[in-house]
Image (cartoon, rainbow, N blue to C red):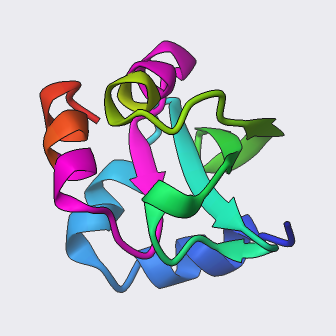
Amino acid sequence: MSFHLNQFLSYVQRQPVLECYLLSDFPMRIAIAHWTGRISPVFDVSDHLLLIDIEGRQEQRREDIKLMSDNPLERAKELSELGVEILICGSISNIMKVTHDLSLI
């Protein structure tokens, strides 16, 4: 998946809610759900995540992983175990949203 962090950070600077999270100097892990080479239109159909570790506003590492489960509870557990702090996708179904809210992602 072609993803350019600088373009994304430029977009984030125009979004005050995201800016406070992503433009801090604290390390964080972002997960981008993707499907057929694009940001997934719905998280539920995505089976891959692009994990990006950011520290000091710089990309430190990226890794593409395959999600192991379709079950909402298992997916929330996977994200939590991976240390994901922000999940980026087009949308998320209600059951997935509730599940992820409960896991504090």
In this picture, residue 10 sits left or right of residue 17: right
Q: How many marks?
A: 0
Residue 62 seen in render: no
In the displayed structure, 99 sits above or below 80; it is below
Residue 18 percent across, percent down from the top left:
31, 64
Q: Quick one: 101 or 73, which is closer to the camera?
A: 73
In this picture, residue 54 sits left or right of residue 13: right
84 falls in the magenta region: yes
In this picture, residue 79 sits left or right of residue 50: left
The span picked out in magenta is: 77-97
Task: Give the residue at x 13% y 43%.
Answer: 98
Task: Give the residue at x 45% y 31%.
Answer: 75
Q: Quick one: 44 or 102, which is closer to the camera?
A: 44
Task: Give the residue at x 20% y 29%.
Answer: 104
Task: Give the residue at x 59% y 56%.
Answer: 32
Q: Quadrant of residue 5?
A: bottom right
Residue 16 seen in render: yes
In the displayed structure, 29 sits above or below 88; it is above
In the displayed structure, 5 sits above or below 41; it is above
Residue 38 percent across, percent down from the top left:
72, 77
Residue 64 percent across, percent down from the top left:
81, 42
Q: Quadrant of residue 10?
A: bottom right
Residue 49 percent across, percent down from the top left:
67, 47
